[in-house]
């Protein structure tokens, strides 16, 4: 029997303020798209250009890069984490043979924060555990878990607990 990799996908779906509620000083970087579908993407976030050019804040990692998924109507923005935050591969005996671990987004080196009212946190995938923790001085946390029999059993566009939590 061949090794069968199991990919656990966690996507953080970012819902940002609409353009009518974004103050005029929150604009995209010069030469970069300011919207993905009907959602405004204000700096320090930035939509990755087709040629790979950066439009987000420099020097703080991938956490502010936005991928605009045009397969949705209207297109939807996702935080670009190379689409995989954690990858586990199992052998035929059920033992983990590859564990790439977890990735994170760190807002602490910036003056920016997550909004309690304008951002939504999702964990998407089978056997997924997602957490969001605040810095030491501002203690808060959010945790969600999702499960499903297979990726095919997940309903696209819905988040009702089968392969998705929020």
Image: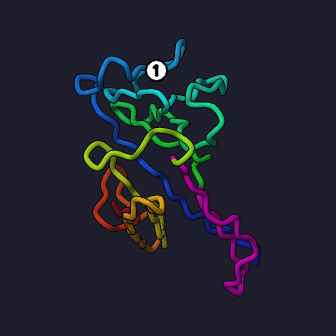
Residue at 71 percent of width and 87 percent of height: 93
Residue at 46 percent of width and 20 percent of height: 28
Does the stretch in magenta take in 92? yes
Residue at 69 percent of width and 76 percent of height: 90
Q: Residue furthest top?
A: 31
The image quarter containing residue 144 is bottom left
Does the stretch in magenta take in 12? no
Left or right, residue 6 beside residue 14: right
Q: Indicate the position of residue 6 as horizontal and vertical percent values.
A: 62, 68
Give whichever of 45, 77 is nearer the camera.
45
Left or right, residue 65 beside residue 38: right
Give whichever of 51, 32 is nearer the camera.
32
The N terminus, quarter of image: bottom right
Q: Indicate the position of residue 129 as horizontal and vertical percent values.
A: 47, 70
Q: Indicate the position of residue 68 as horizontal and vertical percent values.
A: 47, 32
Q: Residue furthest bottom?
A: 93
Identify the residue under disc 1.
28
Q: Indicate the position of residue 58 as horizontal and vertical percent values.
A: 63, 31
Give whichever of 100, 106 is nearer the camera.
106
Q: Which element is circle 1 on?
A: loop
Task: Provide the residue span drawn in magenta.
Answer: 85-107
| Prevalent SS, magenta region | loop
When the figure is inspected, residue 85 is found, relative to residue 34, above or below; the finding is below
């Amino acid at each position: 029997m061949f090794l069968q990799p199991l990919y656990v996908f966690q996507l953080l779906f970012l819902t940002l303020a609409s353009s009518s509620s974004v103050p005029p000083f929150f604009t995209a970087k010069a030469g970069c798209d300011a919207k993905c579908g009907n959602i405004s993407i204000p700096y320090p976030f930035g939509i990755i250009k087709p040629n790979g050019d950066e439009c987000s804040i420099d020097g703080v990692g991938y956490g502010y890069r936005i991928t605009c998924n045009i397969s949705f109507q209207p297109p939807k923005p996702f935080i670009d984490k190379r689409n995989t935050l954690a990858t586990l591969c199992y052998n035929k005996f059920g033992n983990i043979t590859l564990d790439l671990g977890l990735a994170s987004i760190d807002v602490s080196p910036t003056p920016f924060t997550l909004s309690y009212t304008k951002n939504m946190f999702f964990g998407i995938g089978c056997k997924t555990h997602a957490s969001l923790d605040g810095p030491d001085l501002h203690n808060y946390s959010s945790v969600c878990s999702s499960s499903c029999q297979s990726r095919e059993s997940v309903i696209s566009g819905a988040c009702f607990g089968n392969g998705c939590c929020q």
